[in-house]
Amino acid sequence: MLERYLWRQRISCEIKLVTRVDNKESGHMVKIDLITGFLGSGKTTFIKKYVSYLVGKGYNVGILENDYGAVNVDMMLLQDVMGENCHAEMVAGGCGEDCHKRRFKTKLIAMGMSGYDRVIVEPSGIFDVDEFFDVLHEEPLDRWYEVGSIISIVDAGLDRDMSRQSRYVLASEVANCGTLVMSKVQDASEDEKRSTIEYINEVLTEFQCKRQFGDDVLEKNWDDFTDDDFEGFMSTGYKLNDYVKLWFKQSDVFNSVYIMNKVMPQERLETIVRDIFADKECGDVFRIKGFLPVNDTGWIELNATAKKTEVRPIENGQEIIIVIGSNLVEDKIKRYFE
């Protein structure tokens, strides 16, 4: 545990040292931000708001969607912010964790040569943050990138029914963040928000992390974000904290089921979603998301958790629904869509 702490402190020092050297020699290092959060917390929505602010201030921004699944639908959700000064790249999984890490590094190398002022990384909701630091410590990324901010998003109504592996992922996502941002505060009571912070602190303690949250959590309706809030996100940095590593193969614990090329009325889709969440024989379902065409009139975007199902019209999409969870029973889930 002490060795891991010292190793991470060394990474921090070396990144800062390299930053000073490279800034002196070339005058520019790319700031890289990591936006973490468990499945369904609202990372993509936050990124859209954050990137819109950055682009409005004249920054050239690259977004890297880093997912363990074979298909990443969040790329489609970022259409609204893409343009001349904002481009998105994707690292899809489905090839094993070591292969995925190599792809992540390769993509960051390419983006490091693309002239971005800032790169925003959105990992999957089951991302172990150590991978972020590990990759940035490797050549040549350690000379090209400077860690900007780590921002963690947490749902104000966070589900407490988590496996030990899920609790570990949650702890790793919040332990090092510069700012913990609560989402969907307008839908939660004061007791729910306080209970969520208490639960996060309990999870951190479970994995022997000394960090605890309180009044430093940003509890604010995202529609009310100000320029000062966004400037704060840009400069919040990160805080290295030690915690006990839980070793497990993500593919053995978390999995996804893909439903392709389905067309159905919106009402039926919403019914299917409710039924899948309620049916424990489907496994432990965390989130259901994707797109469907609607009667030749356009597309709808689906974003559902056990507590809330959101459906909205969208200009473009792809015929796919993804069910994400743990110990999912694929045949059982797919029967709902027959």
Image (cartoon, rainbow, N blue to C red):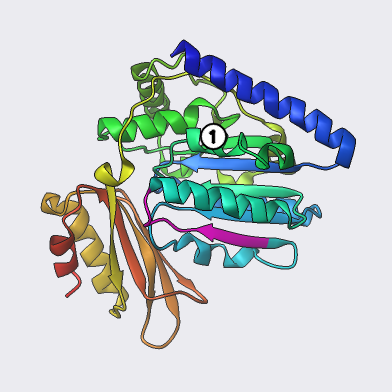
Quadrant in the picture for the N terminus: top left
With 232 as the anchor, is 126 left or right in this view?
A: left
Q: Is residue 95 magenta?
A: yes
User: How far across and down, in percent of the image, does residue 75 sit?
Assistant: 52, 63
Q: At 63% from the left edge and 45% from the top edge, which residue is drawn? A: 224
Q: At 69% from the left edge and 25% from the top edge, which residue is drawn? A: 14
Residue 323 visible in the current orientation: yes
- Quadrant of residue 93 within the rendered picture: bottom left
Secondary structure category for the residue under label 1: helix
- Quadrant of residue 276 within the rendered picture: bottom left
Q: Is residue 133 magenta?
A: no
Above or below: residue 20 compared with residue 89: above
Tag 1: amino acid? Asp
With 252 as the anchor, is 89 left or right in this view?
A: right
User: How far across and down, in percent of the image, does residue 225 sit?
Assistant: 65, 44
Above or below: residue 192 compared with residue 70: above
Q: Nearer the viewer, residue 87 or 132?
A: 132
Identify the residue under disc 1: 134
Residue that lies at the very extreme toward the top in this rendered image: 2
Q: Nearer the viewer, residue 6 or 321?
A: 6
Q: At 29% from the left edge and 78% from the top edge, which residue is drawn? A: 262
Q: At 30% from the left edge and 34% from the top edge, which residue is drawn? A: 248
Residue 192 visible in the current orientation: no
Magenta highlight range: 87-96
User: How far across and down, in percent of the image, does residue 43 sit?
Assistant: 50, 48
Could you classify mark 1 by the number of other residues whose Cα lies within 10 Å: few (under 14), some (14-19), or many (20 or more)?
few
Quadrant in the picture for the C terminus: bottom left
